[in-house]
Amino acid sequence: MKHRRLLCTAAVIAGLSAGVAVAKEMQVQVRKTEVRDSPEIMGNVIGELGLGERVNTLVDTKGAAFWKVESLVRTRVIGWIRPSAVSEKKIELTDSGGSAKSVSDLEAAMAGKGIAGGEEKYVQTHNLQNAQAILNQLEADPLTKISVQDIRTFITEGRITQGGN
Amino acid sequence: MNTNTLFRTALRRGSLAAIVALALATAGCSTIEKVGNTIGGTVGRAVSGAARVVSAGQQAYESGQFDSKDEYHVGRAAAAQLIQQYGLFKDDQAVAYLNLVGHTLVTFSDSRAQYAGYHFAVLNSNEVNAFACPGAFIFVTRGMLRLAATEDELAAVLAHEIAHINGRHAVKSIDDSRFKDFLAVMLKEGARQVNAGQLADIGVQMTGDVVKTLTVAGYSRELESEADTKGVAILRDTGYDPNAMIALLTKMDQTLTPSSAGFGKTHPDTKDRIADARKAVGSTLPKPTVRERQARFDRSLALSRSK
């Protein structure tokens, strides 16, 4: 019995020192983030996670450029994302009646609260309503949405070569 | 609610970040404290870490109290101010091209995920200037597009601005007293709902600080140097010619004077910056112009660069 306990303790210590990850629940803290099939800059995008979506981290090495996560909301969404896209900070996912919120509901619920309220107040104080509307158009403009495939094509056409010319 | 009650509330919630933030908020803006690498870590880490200077701004950011969404809203207000001041230049070809160059650089940089992603656009101004607002809104003036003669030089401008975003330089320009106030409010129960008005006022003050830095005061020489050096690294990692940064700064040095509007007014002496960029580029030889790249640069920016 004592032997077994010692062995278990040793196994845990060995596991920890070898960097074996323990799954950690986190939430997406950006509007959306791409999920890649490999921990590489130009890895294929295989899915997307939205604001507030809960994930389990499967590989979350500190300082790594990508972490492997699994969505706890959608089945079969497992892949690599930027660590800064998720946070341990809690984002409320249900309304007062207990119903699930969509991303737009979440944003609407947070609108005008905290620093977001500062944006509105600044805009009103400085009469920037027109400029804010133009900014909204810019944010929604499809020309500002660039995919990994767009970047691949752009690099090839411009003969941009990493590590050489 | 007094400090002791706040401390107990934070303890009950198990929020070490809140406790440390509270300690700093009550101790002063910039205090040398013993803290761990991450404020959200364990107590053991927090008390055994190395000594370093911790500002309220750092505390707010590292504890997750001031997050990427807050940064985005400060940036949106600042961006609206710039759009009001200069006007956005409507040129779909240029917007598409700027976003392709920009997102390519972002992909190869060590960029943090931004709340709503990066957006690049052209400002209708003859000033030679570029701006990086928090939340990753990057604007380049038509004057700057005329000064850049190649895609690699344009990439140098954008890489410099992306480095400002990655370094959170605009947020760092916010007076630390704003973050001290912010943390004090956030520690109260249900802060975002109950104290919405107070937080909105703090948000207005933060935006004012950012706008002042972007349009009047400029960044410190250290932050500009950091943006140039990291910009060179981004150019190199992406596959652009890092010498483009030197070429662009040299043109600025020849064109701009401290009394010039825009960049010349808000940026430190370009001779120092050229020296820093040379150091970052090292012995890398200039790359020859790539015909296809030059052709798309000329074609995509024809309207925005026209007089």
Image (cartoon, coloured by chain):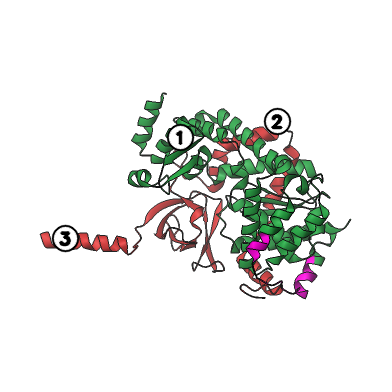
The number of numbered discs placed on residues in the rendered structure image is: 3
Secondary-structure class at tag 3:
helix
Q: Are marks 3 and 2 in contact (CB under 8 Å)?
A: no
Instruction: Answer yes or no: are tags 3 and 2 on the same subunit.
Output: yes
Please state which of the two labelled residues, at mark 2 or mark 1, is closer to the viewer.
Answer: 1
Tag of residue A125:
2
Quarter of the image where one finds residue B153: bottom right
Please state which of the two labelled residues, at mark 3 or mark 2, is closer to the viewer.
Answer: 3
User: Would you say B276 lies left or right of B36 here?
Assistant: right
- Viewer-nearest residue: A72 or B251: B251
Q: Say what amino acid the circle numbered 1 marks.
A: Leu
Where, quadrant-wise, is the N terminus of chain B in this rendering?
Answer: top left
The region drawn magenta spans B277-297
Please state which of the two labelled residues, at mark 1 or mark 3, is closer to the viewer.
Answer: 1
From the top left corner, tell me how far across and down residue A121 is, in percent. 65, 32
User: Would you say A113 lies left or right of B231 here?
Assistant: left
Letter of the chain in red = A
| Residue B187, magenta (yes or no) | no
- Name the residue tied to disc 1: B24
- Viewer-nearest residue: B281 or A95: B281
